Image: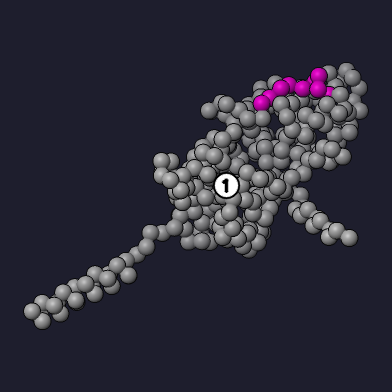
Amino acid sequence: MRAKSTLHRLLISAVLAGAATAPQAKEKFKICADPLNPPYSTQKQDGFENKIAELFAKKLGQDIEYTWFPQRIGFIRNTLNAPVDEKAVDSQEFKCDVVMNIPADSDMALATEPYYQSTYVLLIAKGRGFDDVKSAQQLVDLPVERQDTLKIAMFDRGPGTAWMQKFGLLDMGIPYQSMSGDEDNNVAMQLDQDFKAKKINMVIVWGPIAGYLVSQGPKNGYTMIPMPSTPGIPFEFAMAMGVRNGDKARQQTLNKLIAENKDQIRRIIESYHIPLTEIKKPAKPKDDD
């Protein structure tokens, strides 16, 4: 009996020791992303968000796992805030943990420190009769007969449209939707096609989209003019990464990665021809007197 008891204890010890030393499941870097949204992200993982995610995953020693969903209304609800098991009560496991690109002042998710800041630009196709335009003000000052031939892409909302309205250029605009319902083309891809078909000659567009258009066009095929912010119409915006509200530990991890890899992040973004401006943090409110 004593021998059997001793053997039993040894077997239990071996099982417990094996359980203690068994390899744990490797934590994954779980990204929420649009599968067709160049230059940000694509299912081929060739967008700048994909490249930065690869960099961070490597630094963390983790594998990337994507949850793909079109980045339009409902994106955060269906990805970052969506539990893996929707029927489970108080589930703590979500489909993904990080959105790679949100406005730094967004309240839809908990934002990290901004990791880049870009600006809207006036992008003009060369060889269309407007090569002499070197500033947004020159566009405003063109004779009426030249303004009538602008063919400038105009979105349903945004600072570019507000600027066109302010300077009486709405009648020269060709309307586009900010969010495309097309499963085969995002906004940047549609603009690229229409530039090449000469349906449009110019557009006031967000820096990353302008960078994509430049990368898809002929070498030196565009003039890129940064739009100057004016009272009531800002054109520069800082962008951050987003995690679930309350997930401060992950936010801190990402902030550390952003700070430690800022030069490499900048090189990745600049390789996509995206115009970058200096990140300006908002001033802290003064204490009441």
- Residue 254: x %, y % from top left: 59, 58
Give the secondary structure at mark 1: strand
Q: In screen coordinates, is 180 left or right of 157?
A: left
Instruction: Please tell me in which quadrant of the rendered image residue 108 appears.
Output: top right
Q: Residue at the location (81% across, 19% down)?
A: 171
Residue 180 relative to residue 199: left or right? left
Q: Quadrant of the N terminus?
A: bottom left
Which quadrant of the rendered structure holds the C terminus?
bottom right
Q: Position of residue 33 (x, y in %)?
A: 54, 42
Magenta stretch, residue numbers: 169-177
Q: Which residue is mark 1?
A: 99
Using the rendered image of the protein, determine whether residue 51 is visible from the camera's viewpoint. Answer: no
Color style of the picture: one colour
Decide if residue 63 is on the left or right side of residue 170: left
Mark 1 Cα-neighbour bin, 10 Å: few <14, some 14–19, many ≥20: many
**Residue at horizontal 85%, vertical 58%?**
288
Q: Residue at x 64, y 33 (%)?
A: 188
Q: Is residue 60 magenta?
A: no
Q: Residue at x 76, y 49 (%)?
A: 277
Residue 174 lies in magenta, yes or no?
A: yes
- Measured from the top left, where is residue 169 in percent x and y? 83, 24
Q: Give the residue type at disc 1.
A: Val
Of the pair 174 and 285, the residue shown nearer to us = 285
Q: Nearer the viewer, residue 285 or 272?
A: 285
